[in-house]
Image (cartoon, rainbow, N blue to C red):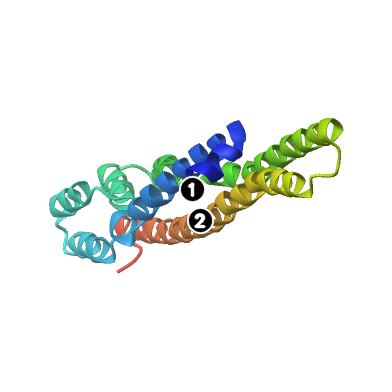
Amino acid sequence: MYEFISQGGTVMYVLLGLSVLALTIIFERAWSLRRSVVFPSDVVKAIEQAVREGNTETALNLSRASETSIGRILWVALHNRGIRRPVLKEALEEIGRQEVAYLERFISVLGVIAAISPLLGLLGTVIGMIEVFRVISIEGVGKADVLAGGIATALNTTAAGLTVAIPSLVAYRFFESRVNQFIVEIEQHALMFVDLLKGERE
């Protein structure tokens, strides 16, 4: 493995660094985007039930203690329950934008890694092929084993670039879809919760 990496030169070390970064982001986002961290249904139901029963303080304490995205949004709604409906919606939209930014953090980096890794791999291959042709100009084309070895070495970076890019792209699309799903659910429940606070929903 060390020989495979060292043969790729500087580009291979850059790809190795990108692979470590991508794996770190994938594990972090997989942990942070769990439903229990973003949208725990049992907590939401408990908060809504407390509001229906008129226990506003209990609902506030539940939303504050949950430390989840939906919990923070519902806390803002409860905290500002006395203001007019349009103003309350604006407050929820503001906190919603903050939560979306939190949910989407680092995901765009995965997209960048997926985009540039194949290009870096191609760059490494081009650099390697330039070196192969330099050897040909000196040694000639008589040593087929040397040429084959040089070409194989040059292609290592392309293989490495694709190896980094493919999982990164899959993870990027998966997390992007998961965040969009959470955003839709949060928006729906936030609107329902406003109706509940204003007595328009039982």
Between 136 and 32, the residue placed more toward the observer is 136
Q: Residue at x 43, y 48 (%)?
A: 23
Distance in Å between CA atoms under marks 1 and 2: 25 Å
Q: Percent position (x, y) of residue 11?
A: 61, 35
Residue, far front: 142
* Dot 1 crowding, Cα within 10 Å, few <14, some 14–19, many 20+: few
Q: Is residue 85 left or right of residue 171?
A: left
Q: Which residue is mark 1?
A: 1
Between 127 and 139, the residue placed more toward the observer is 139
Q: Is residue 21 left or right of residue 125?
A: left
Numbered disc total: 2
User: Which label number is shown at residue 171?
Assistant: 2
Between 39 and 24, the residue placed more toward the observer is 24
- Amino acid carrying label 1: it is Met
Q: Residue at x 63, y 47 (%)?
A: 156
Residue 196 visible in the displayed image: yes
Between 91 and 18, the residue placed more toward the observer is 18
Q: Residue at x 28, y 61 (%)?
A: 40
User: Which label number is shown at residue 92?
Assistant: none
Q: Residue at x 86, y 32 (%)?
A: 137
Element type at mark 1:
loop
Q: Percent position (x, y) of residue 168?
A: 54, 52
Q: Percent position (x, y) of residue 144?
A: 79, 49
